[in-house]
Amino acid sequence: MPASYRSPTFLDDLVMVGVNLKKSGKELVESSAFPQIDAAYSSILRVPAVRGVVILQTCNRFEVYVTTTNKGATIESIKSIIEARVGRPIPEEKFDVKIGIDVARHLFRVASGLESLVLGEGDILRQVREAMEYSAKKGYIDKGLRQLFEEAVKVGKRVRRETDLGKGNIGIPSASVALLKELMGDLSGKKVLVIGAGMAGEIIAKNLHKKEKGVEIWIANRTLEKAELLAKEVGGKAFPLSKVPELLNEVDAVISAVSVTVIDSSTVRNLRKPLLIIDIGEPPSVSPEVAKHPLVTLKDMYAVAEVANRNANERLKEVSKAESIIEEELNKLMDLSQKLLGDKILKELMERAEQIRLNEVERAKSKVPKEYWPILEKMSKSMVKKILKDTILRVKEASLKGDLQLLRLTAELFGLKDSLSELELVYEYNGVNEKLLQRNVNK
């Protein structure tokens, strides 16, 4: 068995299936999004072999991370679920499929900002963490996926701490203001409606207030009190979200930073003046058909990202540093994964040996005076330790080398049923893994 095969504890039983902007395109990513994420979880969890799931859904990607006992069947099932959501078959090459250690590598790159629309952007790290936390809260995650996502968050933080990948990154909210300025020129005397008073909306409003003299800032938010607090800070006006349709004829531009649809074709039906709309919602908060209105100019997240990426040259120099960190952390993760199977064998072996020792000591106690019992305890423990010393060392070495044959032989020799069951999963997986890898190579 090749040494590159690892324990299935939280690496070899991993699968990621999804669509993303780079591989699948904007339209496919947007149409695969689930408005209610629990509906996606419900569908994935009905796949028989799935043990745990985390779904990462952003404007750039819809990715399903699972641990499973049947890689091939699970991959095909998840593809079918995504196709059902999109409403049509998806060409094989449009899917992004990762298995085993490649799942970890991909997620580490995602968390580090290497796969983002804006290179090095920071929001994705929060999104990765929140995806893990949501799955954990709902009880969908398992130990392996938790380990993977916790490591990904650590890696993302380390990349940002030890490289300048995020340096000069103006971010999507600030870039939306820059795009607004490009398209409208002088904003003095203009009215700009900011939809959303969350973190992104706050950055947009404060950016406008600080850099654009004479601009009138209106804030619309679901919670009026929050809109009023932000409006007070920037000298603007606050409105409830329900007022947005009425406000469109009074403002010159809109920047929407919410995750629910607030503007559709019916909202702009009675528009009487030209209106620029910039949508940075995740998922989009402005329906695409709005762009068909003759008085509307609609710019989406991708247009904003082009502005944000104009200063990416310096950050591109940091990519190799980030990738080196990722590979270093992957090696640590592989070592830990390998070590865990050896640890399981040793734990079961020691428990078995301890039970035999206790049984024999109890039998011996009936044949010797009570004052010798402590000596029996000490001597029996010492004997077990010395007898198993070499075996323990060999198992640890085999674990680190990925020598599954020696690990299996040890489990069989000592009758370690739990460890044998897990090793059988490894052998079963490797057969499937080889076929999947070969299929990917042939594409």
Image: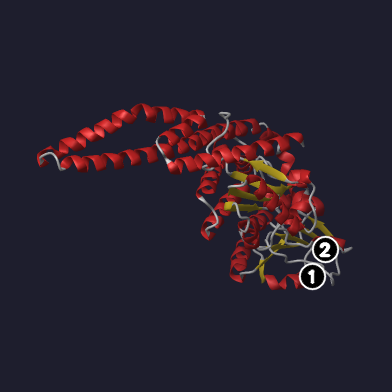
The quadrant of the image that shows the C terminus is top right
**Residue, x 25% and y 42% (percent of image)?**
358
* Residue density around tag 1, few if under 14, some if 14–19, many if 20 or more, within 10 Å: some
The quadrant of the image that shows the N terminus is top right
Q: Can residue 306 be seen at all in this image of the molecule? A: no
Q: Nearer the viewer, residue 197 or 79?
A: 79
Q: Nearer the viewer, residue 243 or 418?
A: 418
Q: Position of residue 111 (x, y in %)?
A: 60, 44
Q: Position of residue 227 (x, y in %)?
A: 62, 66
Q: Is residue 242 above or below residue 369?
A: below
Q: Is residue 372 left or right of residue 314?
A: left
Label 2 near label 1: C-beta < 8 Å?
A: yes
Q: Nearer the viewer, residue 332 or 430?
A: 430
| Residue 119, picture quadrant | top right
Q: Position of residue 342 (x, y in %)?
A: 44, 35
* Residue density around tag 2, few if under 14, some if 14–19, many if 20 or more, within 10 Å: many
* Residue pointed to by mark 2: 290
Q: Nearer the viewer, residue 72 or 278?
A: 72
Give the tally of numbered discs. 2
Q: Amino acid at mark 1?
A: Thr
Q: Amino acid at mark 2?
A: Val
* Residue pointed to by mark 1: 267
Q: Position of residue 429 (x, y in %)?
A: 59, 40
Q: Secondary structure at mark 2?
A: helix
Q: Is residue 273 left or right of residue 340?
A: right
Q: Is residue 360 above or below residue 240?
A: above
Q: Can residue 312 be seen at all in this image of the molecule? A: yes
Q: CA distance from mark 1 to mark 2?
A: 9 Å
**Residue, x 46% and y 32% (percent of image)?**
409
Q: Earlier in the sequence, mark 1 or mark 2?
A: 1
